[in-house]
Amino acid sequence: MSRECQICGKGPTTGNMVSHSNRRTKRRWLPNLQKMTVQQPGGKITLRVCTRCMRSYKSSLSK
């Protein structure tokens, strides 16, 4: 189960944690993925979607 949005492909990014003494250690920022059920012509499917895609998908339904 990868931590990647199934719509836009957004995944983890890497960088450094910087302490008060300016030491640097590696860290990761993970995307905010949620499970979302989407109605397709063949039936319902469950996607792991980032909240940004979820928000744009729901706003496109209301228009």
Image (tube, helix red, strand yellow):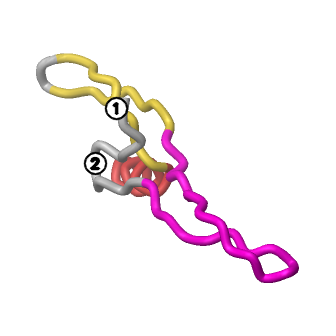
Residue 37: give x, y in percent of width and height: 38, 26
**Which of the 4 quarters of the picture holds residue 40?**
top left
Does the magenta run of residues contain 40? Answer: no
Does the magenta run of residues contain 16? Answer: yes
* Numbered tag placed on residue 7 in the rendering: 2
**Residue found at the very far right of the displayed protein:** 20
10 Å neighbourhood of mark 1: few (<14), some, or many (≥20)?
A: some
User: Foreground: 48 or 27?
Assistant: 27
Q: Are marks 2 and 1 in contact (CB under 8 Å)?
A: yes
Residue with the mark numbered 1: 47
Seen at 56% across and 58% down, the residue is: 29
Q: Secondary structure at mark 2?
A: loop
Residue 19: give x, y in percent of width and height: 81, 74
Seen at 27% across and 22% down, the residue is: 45
Residue 63 at least partly seen: no
Identify the amino acid type marked 2.
Answer: Ile
User: Foreground: 9 or 61?
Assistant: 9
Residue 42: give x, y in percent of width and height: 12, 19
Q: Which residues are magenta?
A: 12-33
The mark that comes first in sequence, 2 or 1, is: 2
